[in-house]
Image (cartoon, rainbow, N blue to C red):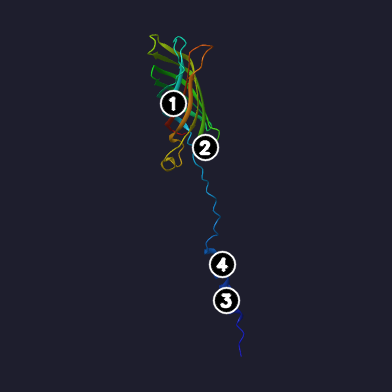
Amino acid sequence: MLRPMPLSRALGLAIASVTLLAASHVHAAPPAEPESPKLDRKPPRISGTYLGMAIWPALTWVYSPNLEVDQRAPLGGGGGALRLGQAVFPWLTIGLDAGGAFVWNRDRFFMKGGLLVDFGFYPMPKKYPLSIHAGFGFGAGLVLDDRVETKGGVGGPRFSGALRYEFFPGAGFRRPRKPGGWALGPELAWRGFTPAGRDKPMSNAIVLGIWFGYYWGK
């Protein structure tokens, strides 16, 4: 016949069970907190001061009214520009463009140069580094024609318009958390001297070139 367990022993076993249970809760690892999603924010590449240059082949039409010869034939050649500026906002850059070109054909030679203030607009700066550029300034050009001894030329106000797309090779590895970096990309542009009136000197150039430069970031 089974004897009933003494009250003191039963009470001791109960206290020991409660103590072990409490100890297990104390030493148990705290519940894991849900992981917050990592924010993959890429730093802006169009940022800070920039310095670079563009080089291009060009197709040019130039007219100087003092040269009494047929001037309708285009001239081919090339040129370039040195650029220094600042990314004022993620969608706007302002800079200086100092450039020139040499173009020619069978009868004519034309060299020109000038200084422009360039404004760059980035419609979608966070997604695509595509920019629309407009510039204005001044410059001058000299026209030589083998068919006449007279020299011609253009000069005065100068304007430009361009489309540019920029790539930043290796920026994600070299400076993953820093803005700016080396830039490289194609550029399609018009650069010209617009006529001040009827039968006035003028020049129009279509260029397709490459821009490369460096943004310091900020």
Name the residue nearer the viewer: 129 or 218: 129
Q: Which residue is mark 3?
A: 13
> At which x and y percent is residue 217?
46, 34
Q: Any mark on residue 22, and which?
A: 4
Q: Which residue is mark 2?
A: 128
Q: SS at mark 1?
A: strand
Name the residue nearer the viewer: 76 or 118: 76
Judged by depth in the image, the label closer to the viewer, 4 or 2, is: 2
Would you say the residues marked 1 and 4 are in contact, meaning their CB atoms lie under 8 Å apart? Answer: no
Disc 1 versus disc 4: distance between alpha carbons? Answer: 71 Å
Q: Any mark on residue 84, and which?
A: 1
Would you say the residues marked 3 and 2 are in contact, meaning their CB atoms lie under 8 Å apart? Answer: no
Assess disc 1: are there few (<14), some (14-19) or many (≥20) residues with their C-alpha within 10 Å of its C-alpha: some
* Amino acid type, residue under disc 4 in the picture: Ala
- Residue at left 52%, top 37%? 128
In the rendered image, the vertical position of residue 115 relative to residue 10, given as above or below = above
* Amino acid type, residue under disc 2 in the picture: Tyr
Disc 1 versus disc 3: distance between alpha carbons? Answer: 85 Å
Judged by depth in the image, the label closer to the viewer, 3 or 2, is: 2
Would you say the residues marked 1 and 3 are in contact, meaning their CB atoms lie under 8 Å apart? Answer: no
Q: Earlier in the sequence, mark 1 or mark 2?
A: 1
Disc 1 versus disc 2: distance between alpha carbons? Answer: 22 Å
Q: Earlier in the sequence, mark 1 or mark 3?
A: 3
